[in-house]
Image (cartoon, rainbow, N blue to C red):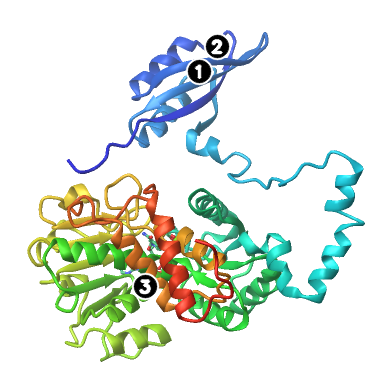
Amino acid sequence: MRKQPLDGKTIILRLELDTGKAQFGSAATAIERAGGDIIAIDVIHTSRERTTRDLTVKIAHSDTSQRIAQAIEELPGIRLVNISDRTFLLHLGGKIAIQPKTPIVNRDDLSRVYTPEVARVCNAIHEDPSKAFTLTVKRNMVAVVSDGSAVLGLGNIGPYAAMPVMEGKAMLFKQFADVDAFPICLDTQDTEGIIAAVKAIAPAFGGINLEDIAAPRCFEIEQRLREELDIPVFHDDQHGTAVVLYAGLLNALKLTGRRIEEARIVVCGIGAAGTACTKMLLAGGARHVIGVDREGILTRDRHYPNGMWQWYAEHTNEERISGGLAEALNGADVFIGLSAGGILKREDVETMSASPIVFAMANPEPEIRPETVEDIVGVIATGRSDYPNQINNVLCFPGIFRGALDCRASSINEAMKLAAAEAIASVISEEELSQLYIIPSVFNQRIVDEIRRRVIHAAIESGVARRQPRE
Ligand SMILES: NC(=O)C1=CN([C@@H]2O[C@H](COP(=O)(O)OP(=O)(O)OC[C@H]3O[C@@H](n4cnc5c(N)ncnc54)[C@H](O)[C@@H]3O)[C@@H](O)[C@H]2O)C=CC1
Ligand SMILES: CC(=O)C(=O)O
Ligand SMILES: [Mg+2]
């Protein structure tokens, strides 16, 4: 079985028990019957009338916690105050913090980090704004900007609900590439409003990572910001995803003995990620790409009000195949899913060519679970950490920004993206390449350095580097 087992989840139940009415033993029995394994009990508060206890319970499946909650609700004199799981506990108070680099222990320190001495530094930057890169956090700071309109595959959940994802991205930047990143979730979904807000905050940042902004507005926002700012602006869902997908596909094609020029490729979900991935595939030589969205296959026989779809229809599906996902998949070699969870069925995969490549990249739920088709596919990958072959933009954005910041690039261009894709693919040697290992793990220590090195080289060669960093 290829699926890596999910560790049993630990939840913490806070129970309030009325003295006299409630029996703790009945709660313990109900929890065990519902599938929970009590591993610790803490008394939080006790009085004559009631007792509050925290029960740490191991569960094997996510739906067990709901069953436990229902079972407890039926017990007299016992109230379930809340259920927290370790994931929620980990999010308490957010996941990142800002730390000063030097302590302030006396007035002299205070005078230098703040007024009056800081004024000399301000004046130096006023005289030469490029000094902001050396004398402020700008040099190593990236804004992770979202409007909450296409958060993972959860859709338009808004800026507050988007924060945990953006904080997570900021953590990954720091953890993997020592880039200081800050989550900025904007309370506007207006294109001009987003552009204005990002331009207004740009002085503090050396780069802008746009995240989870829905198509088609993400295209204009990115293009305008690229034109109007002199720091890299990178829409991660487009380009980070495309870079990693391309790297993974190069290896999967090699493994299954296919050539990109001949492979019949179906891209499902023609939004931010699907569009950028297609552009990268076309630039890499793919000639038989078909795009499918909710309304079916995109074809040049139709006119689309969405300009990007119009472009897409004109540059793909030369054979003018029409219909839905089933028609597109018939005989296809590759499925690339960037759409929604669970939409691909085993019967669909059975109509593809022998040993097809299936990249089900929707998050958090892939288009199809690997265990459903692992016996009939050549390669399967998802965007998740709990399966082998994780195709996720986290493999790209830390390293590509590390490189761009270190050479103070004014933008992240096509040459740098291609360099990043080649860097990722190169981390796996011919001997290592296998069905379960077409893409390196995010924990592979070589990835960020390899991407950084090649991206800096590409930036210098293509003339966007403003500084030659030391190796
Ligand atoms: N693994 C990875 O690294 C990444 C995965 N993703 C995932 O890809 C998905 C799309 O992300 P974005 O492009 O940013 O969103 P988006 O909102 O820009 O695009 C999604 C597209 O999928 C289409 N779609 C939805 N349901 C569909 C269905 N049943 N059949 C066909 N098309 C359908 C939508 O109409 C839309 O055009 C999300 O689940 C996201 O989590 C996105 C970026 C990176
Ligand atoms: C991975 C990612 O950026 C997404 O699913 O939106
Ligand atoms: Mg994203």
Q: Residues within 10 Å of mark 3 (few under 14, many from 20)?
A: many
Element type where label 2 sits in the image: loop
Quadrant (top left, top right, bottom left, bottom right) of the N terminus: top left
Q: Nearer the viewer, residue 6 or 121?
A: 121
Mark 3, secondary structure of its residue? helix
- Identify the mark nearer the N-term, 2 or 1: 2
Indicate if the residue with disc 3 has its beta carbon within 8 Å of ligand 1. no
Q: Nearer the viewer, mark 1 or mark 3?
A: 3
Please indicate, yes or no, whether residue 394 appears anywhere in the rendered image.
Answer: no
Instruction: Find residue 74 and report its image quarter.
Output: top left
Please state the quadrant of the image where ligand 1 appears. bottom left
Q: Which circle marks residue 21 in the picture? A: 2
Can residue 398 be seen in this snapshot? yes
Q: Nearer the viewer, residue 297 or 75?
A: 297
Distance in Å between CA atoms under marks 3 and 2: 68 Å
Asked if 336 appears above or below 379 in the picture, the reply is: below
Task: Give the SS element for disc 1.
Answer: loop
Q: Which residue is mark 1?
A: 76
Q: Report whether 345 appears left or right of 268.
A: left
Amino acid under label 3? Leu
- Earlier sequence position, callout 1 versus callout 3: 1
Residue 129 at x, y percent in the picture: 75, 74
Above or below, 164 relative to 274: above
Which of 422 and 53 lies nearest the eye of the viewer? 422
The total of numbered circles placed on residues is: 3
The residue carrying mark 3 is 418
Report if the CB atoms under discs 2 and 1 are less than 8 Å apart: yes
Near mark 2 (Cα within 10 A), the count class, few <14, some 14-19 or many ≥20, is few
Q: Quadrant of residue 137?
A: bottom right
